């Protein structure tokens, strides 16, 4: 792997010290070169109060050049590959909430061309976020599933900050009598229909997903389209940015 002049020193040492990381590489990253890079930041809370709603931010804006995709991997989760982001016209940044079954290393792998740059952190958490139904979410009526609420703000050099929420139980199939039912894909487009970002979600994403992206939109409303594993097709819209985010 070539180290560009002025780049922070990449390393083979896992900052999360995960014994499962080599198997995660084999499962998800393939044979391309892999190096840990401090510019790929995985931001986690110091204390986890609700294992079904753990906030996570991945920020790789410090990397040079375009990014092809970002993978979020929770090594010890039942569904390790939590999210895949393709930032077509977006910054290498994503914030979300996820379910955690136990304390685990969480890695963000960023592909640039033929190599992966990786960041990681360890989340100390109690168990049960994937195998226990969240309180208050035993829903007999799913008529509201797929409703999308979204808002966008101007965000300086990063373009537009888009935050959206999709009403959906995100059931993972691990709870007896509750089949898997979750959002699989999300696509963001500008007012002309040009793609800005694509996401593939897994069962590990928290119920009623809330995601934040930084997209490069020329103006006008943004369109959000989501599909779930039952074939549900949902659409929403964020009005044009109305000022800087609060």
Image (cartoon, rainbow, N blue to C red):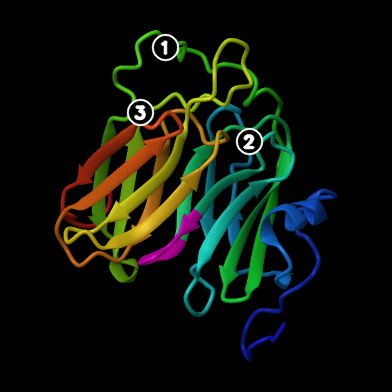
Left or right relative to 167: residue 120: right
SS at mark 2 in the image: loop
Residue at the extreme right of the image, as rendered: 19
Compared with residue 75, is residue 220 higher up or lower down, i.e. above or below? Answer: below
Majority secondary structure of magenta residues: strand
Q: Quadrant of residue 111?
A: bottom right
Q: Is residue 88 magenta?
A: yes
The alpha-carbon separation of the residues under discs 1 and 2 comes to 29 Å
Residue at 35% from the left image edge and 50% from the top image edge: 187
What residue is shown with label 1?
A: 139
The alpha-carbon separation of the residues under discs 3 and 2 comes to 26 Å
Image coords of residue 159 (percent x, y): 29, 66
Q: Which mark is residue 167?
A: 3
Image coords of residue 34 (percent x, y): 72, 69
Which label lies toward us, 1 or 2?
1
* Residue neighbourhood size for the residue with mark 2, other residues' Cα within 10 Å, grouped as few (<14), some (14–19), many (≥20): few
User: Which numbered disc flags the more N-terminal residue, 3 or 2?
Assistant: 2
Residue at 30% from the left image edge and 44% from the top image edge: 225
**Figure quadrant of the N terminus:** bottom right
The alpha-carbon separation of the residues under discs 3 and 1 comes to 12 Å
Q: Which mark is residue 47?
A: 2
Q: Is residue 43 magenta?
A: no
Q: Quadrant of residue 75?
A: top right
* Residue neighbourhood size for the residue with mark 1, other residues' Cα within 10 Å, grouped as few (<14), some (14–19), many (≥20): few
Residue at 56% from the left image edge and 16% from the top image edge: 133
Q: Is residue 17 visible?
A: no
Mark 3 near mark 1, Cβ–Cβ under 8 Å? no
Image coords of residue 127 (percent x, y): 71, 25
User: Which numbered disc flags the more N-terminal residue, 3 or 1?
Assistant: 1
Image coords of residue 152 (percent x, y): 25, 51
SS at mark 1 in the image: loop
Tell me the magenta residue range: 85-92
């Amino acid at each position: 792997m070539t180290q560009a002049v002025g780049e922070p020193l990449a390393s083979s040492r896992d900052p999360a010290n995960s014994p499962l990381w080599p198997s995660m590489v084999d499962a998800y990253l393939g044979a391309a070169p892999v190096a840990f890079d401090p510019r790929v930041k995985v931001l986690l809370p110091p204390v986890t109060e609700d294992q079904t709603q753990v906030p996570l931010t991945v920020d790789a804006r410090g990397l040079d050049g375009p990014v092809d995709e970002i993978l979020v991997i929770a090594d010890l989760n039942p569904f390790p590959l939590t999210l895949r982001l393709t930032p077509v016209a977006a910054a290498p940044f994503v914030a979300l909430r996820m379910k955690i079954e136990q304390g685990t290393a969480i890695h963000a792998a960023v592909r640039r061309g033929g190599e992966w740059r990786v960041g990681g952190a360890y989340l100390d958490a109690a168990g049960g976020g994937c195998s226990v139904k969240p309180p208050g979410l035993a829903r007999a009526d799913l008529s509201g599933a797929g409703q999308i609420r979204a808002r966008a703000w101007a965000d300086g050099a990063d373009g537009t900050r888009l935050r959206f929420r999709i009403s959906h139980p995100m059931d993972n199939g691990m709870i007896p009598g509750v089949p898997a039912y979750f959002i699989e894909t999300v696509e963001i487009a500008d007012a002309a229909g040009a793609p800005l970002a694509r996401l593939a979600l897994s069962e590990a994403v928290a119920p009623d997903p809330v995601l934040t992206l930084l997209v490069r939109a020329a103006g006008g409303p943004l369109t959000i389209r989501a599909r779930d594993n039952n074939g549900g097709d949902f659409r929403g819209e964020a009005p044009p940015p109305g000022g800087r985010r609060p």
